[in-house]
Amino acid sequence: MRILKRASTLILRKGTYQSTWWKKDSLFRVHPSVSQALVENKPVVALESTIITHGMPYPHNLSTAKEVEGIVRAEGAIPATVGVIEGKVHVGLSSEELDHLARSKSSLKVSRRDLPYVISKALTGGTTVSATMIAAHQAGIPVFVTGGIGGVHRDGENSLDISADLTELGRTPIAVVSAGVKSILDIGRTLEFLETQGVCVATYGSSKHFPAFFSPESGFTSPYQVDNPDEAATLIASTLSLGLQSGVLLAVPIPEEHAAAGQQVEDAIQAALTEASAKGITGRDVTPFILQRVNELTKGKSLQANIALIHNNARVGSQIACALSKQMSETKLRSKTQHQKKPVSDSKSDIVVIGGINVDFIAKGKTKTLQFGQTNPGSVCQSFGGVGRNIADSLSRLGHKPLLISATGADSHSDAVLNYCKHINTSAVARIEEQSTATYCVVITGSGELSLGLGDMDIHQQITQHYVSQFEKQLSSASLVCLDGNIPVSTIDYVCSLAKKHNINVWYEPTDLDKACKPFLSDAWKSLSYSSPNLAELCTMNKTLGVPTPEVLQSSLEERLRLAVTLSRPLLEHLHCLVVTLGADGVLVCGEHDAGSINMQPRKQKRRRRLCALHYPALPLAAEEIMNVSGAGDSLAGAMMAGILQGRDTDSCVQMGLLAARLSLASPHPIAPTLTIESVDPTKVQTQNWPKPSFMWIE
């Protein structure tokens, strides 16, 4: 695990660039229980919060919210109530955060249009259907439960008063489970509008009757109908598989035991509508008038019926989420089984990565300093890491198909990590009985400082020369082989001997100070082409070769750059290129001079060359935006490898690496799930001009 001594290792504290994807990650806060459930493919149900902030008075709003979350848990799913607190969109709320929203007297009602303003002003609010859909989709939650959705208001053909819920359903791939549309709205035009938006609408149950919230029948029918959770889940899975980018509306009729009370409310609505018409009330004044009159006519029974509906929707929605999770897991298992049946020798990979797979536990305190010997407030989340796995993950998300050679135990951790790594070619990962999958726990302070790390990495010693030699064919034909320092010295020596024999380009990622020396214990290092040490690891490499190095690293940037250039020179006698990470001071790339830059493209043969170095300043990221410090270095290396193999120039390769690193720091995962070619392509990401790197000759 490559841990950066400070969370800002790959970034400058000052700068101008801000990535679109990074902004998203920094503004959304996913609760650890939700994040872990998503990683493990467990069912999660999103819930809105306007019912808390605007739907009921305190404490009824808080008790109802907790009851709904309790129903979701009882059905086997994880609740993820969405809300905006002080300008951050929270997906999943703690008990304290729920209470804060319930008591707040200044909370805003936050729809899609309101999100930019509420975030820019660091305000607090309850999310409507549309805003909750946006947050759920951003977090990767496919099922969202609410009471009822908005619609086309009566006289909407003239006023154009149409709820943003409908347009959101047309552009966000989320399944919304609701009790239909209240009869105070124009249900017919609402269904027509949903059809225009391309939204698949289905009634849940034995009938196609489209429910009108308090009534099981509205006088209109849904285009489709699903009988049970399995059918509903299959419909959702089909929608997601097609990639249509539109949602599904599942309309759940009011339960029979509440139909009588619901009908009483419905009668009151119809009476209020008649009264509004007689009094000449029109436009935006209609809805407030009707709601007030309904509450008066029913003597508060409308609130009780409303709560019963929400409870039922939560129950049904959770059952659907569980069925969907089960179906998706079974599909992945079938795909994995078919994949494993393929002979390993058939794997076609342009890159081979040999290294560790870890299950990571990230604990971040809420305070700047942590008190040892006692419990500190903070958050703990699980993610999947390991340097080799991280680099393979990064490369896979950037358009390559690396073969990952590694080892895990035959345990639940292995099941979880391999399930999460379905986008990576893991056919060469050995699962070993009576061994434990590597685990790593890191504790960081609220300001992003590494406080403590603990790891059980013994399984990495099973990535032996004998095991790796089974993949000699893939290694010999790869464009690039990446080794991480967790693997045994004998395995590193074996791969380097192959590299010498077949002229293979090998990238060595040292992982930490103690492992940086491994290739340099023999002449194996002379067969390496690339390496990406930090300055301390570069010192270790030189010290192992007998080159004098300072006992204490200099503090000024000029001195650190001078030292890095000096220590790169002995290694560049054989290595093609060195990428030296300098923490908050950025990255120093050292190698063959080529027209004022450095030639990073894979070399076909060694030759005499003029050497130079380029220093690239790092990118900005505030300490409070940092969510994970365990994958930034691996993201940098993986993205740079991708850029090199895509034939990009050196500036673009380094810029890709810096962008990927910052995405990692702002994500709860070591490799950000939002990592794509587009999100790190300097030609496509909108930014101010990149600062020109400083040039130095290496004599």
Image (cartoon, helix red, strand yellow):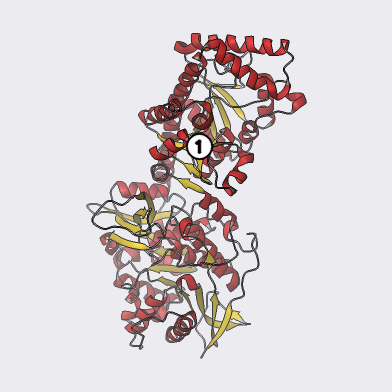
Q: Position of residue 272 (x, y in %)?
A: 64, 12
- State the residue in front, 187 or 279: 279
Who's the residue at 68% across and 10% down the image?
275
Could you say whether the residue bearing mark 1 is in a helix, strand or loop? loop
**The furthest residue to the right:** 158
Residue for badge 1: 142
Report the number of discs: 1
- State the residue in front, 375 or 386: 375
Q: Position of residue 510 (x, y in %)?
A: 38, 71
Relative to residue 194, is residue 603 depicted above or below? below
Q: Position of residue 693 (x, y in %)?
A: 59, 76
Q: Quadrant of the N terminus?
A: bottom left
Instruction: Using the rendered image of the protein, determine whether residue 185 is visible from the camera's viewpoint.
Output: no
- State the residue in front, 570 or 466: 570
The quarter of the picture where residue 627 lies is bottom left
**The furthest residue to the front:** 105
Relative to residue 538, is residue 66 depicted above or below? above
The quarter of the picture where residue 153 lies is top right
Q: How packed is label 1: few (under 14 Cα within 10 Å), some, or many (20 or more)? A: many
- Name the amino acid type tagged 1: Pro
Instruction: Using the rendered image of the protein, determine whether residue 217 is visible from the camera's viewpoint.
Output: yes
User: Would residue 432 be found to the left or right of residue 582 on screen?
Assistant: left
